[in-house]
Amino acid sequence: MANYTAADIKALRERTGAGMMDVKKALDEANGDADKAVELIRIKGLKGATKREGRSTAEGLVAAKVIDGTVGVMVEVNCETDFVAKSAKFIDLADKVLSVAVDSGASDLESLLAAQVDGKPLNEVVVEEGAVLGEKVVVRRLARVEGKTVDAYLHKTSKDLPAQVGVLFAVDAEGDAAVAAAHDVAVHTAAFAPTYLTREEVPAETVENERRIADETARAENKPEAALPKIVEGRLNGFFKEIVLLDQPFAKDPKVSVGKVLEQAGANATAFARFRVGA
């Protein structure tokens, strides 16, 4: 019988995140050598990695960090189950991914996954850690936002899980008013999920399609011909209020727009990013 105790099993489970039976089998095969057992767990997991390639990764977390108040970095790391998503091993991996994103200065996912970690690409590290966890793990998205003031907001949709929604929001101003406004707008963005920052960013074909739908709908409602242009523009403005951040009614005071709130703080929005796990 291998020379190990219940405490050894517990320690190895905490170290690897692997199941109890997998840990016991590895310790048996390694004759109680914890380091060898970790290696065996990794090897076993990697052998099953190809079987996990087609699995869905709809769970996970969002992690973010602001550097010097002016650069925000955010990553989404996915796994298969919420059980793994809330495990210390997975959270530590996500923190490692975020640290690599910050340190490497990567601005796109491909560059991030190619960044070196202890002599190997981050992508290999993620695969290996997923092997230990027994699930497919992927780094899905990376965002990098810069401005004179950048705020990061993370939101938990369940108290038992890590953050599922993350926002980076940047403005071109500094000072207490700008910092407060940037944070308030970041929180607003997490809740109201805008698609675009400004009207100008909305693709022209999307605008024209909405205009056509508004016109056809008004005609089907037998609205007066002379009133059609005003009705169409009104409905188009309503569409913008749904998808454009600066046009949205502000969460704390729906009587004013997000753009107006920033204007009152002496700031202009320069960029934002919003991630929701699996969306």
Image: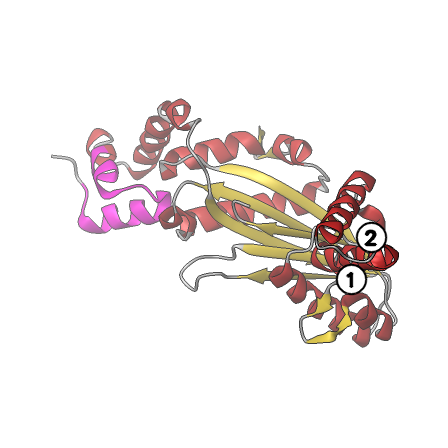
Vertical order, 259 against 142 (above or below) = below
Discs 2, 1 touching: Cβ within 8 Å = yes
Question: Which residue lies at the image location 49% right of the left edge and 42% below the top edge?
Answer: 78
Q: Amino acid at mark 2?
A: Arg
Q: Nearer the viewer, residue 177 or 27?
A: 177
Mark number, residue 199: 2
Secondary structure found at label 2: helix
Q: Is residue 14 magenta?
A: yes
Mark number, residue 53: none
Q: Which residues are magenta?
A: 4-25
Whether residue 153 is visible here, answered yes or no, is no
Mark number, residue 247: 1
Question: Which residue lies at the image location 39% right of the left edge and 33% below the top edge?
Answer: 131
> Within 10 Å of the Cα at label 2, are there few (<14), some (14-19), or many (20+) other Cα atoms?
some
Question: Is residue 12 found left or right of 150 in the rendered image?
Answer: left
| Relative image position of residue 184 (x, y in whole percent) | 70, 70
Secondary structure found at label 1: helix
Question: Which residue lies at the image location 86% right of the left edge and 70% below the top edge?
Answer: 263
Q: Amino acid at mark 1?
A: Asp
Looking at the image, tell me whether mark 2 or mark 1 is earlier in sequence order: 2
Image quadrant where residue 236 sits: bottom right
Question: Which residue lies at the image location 23% right of the left edge and 43% below the top edge?
Answer: 20
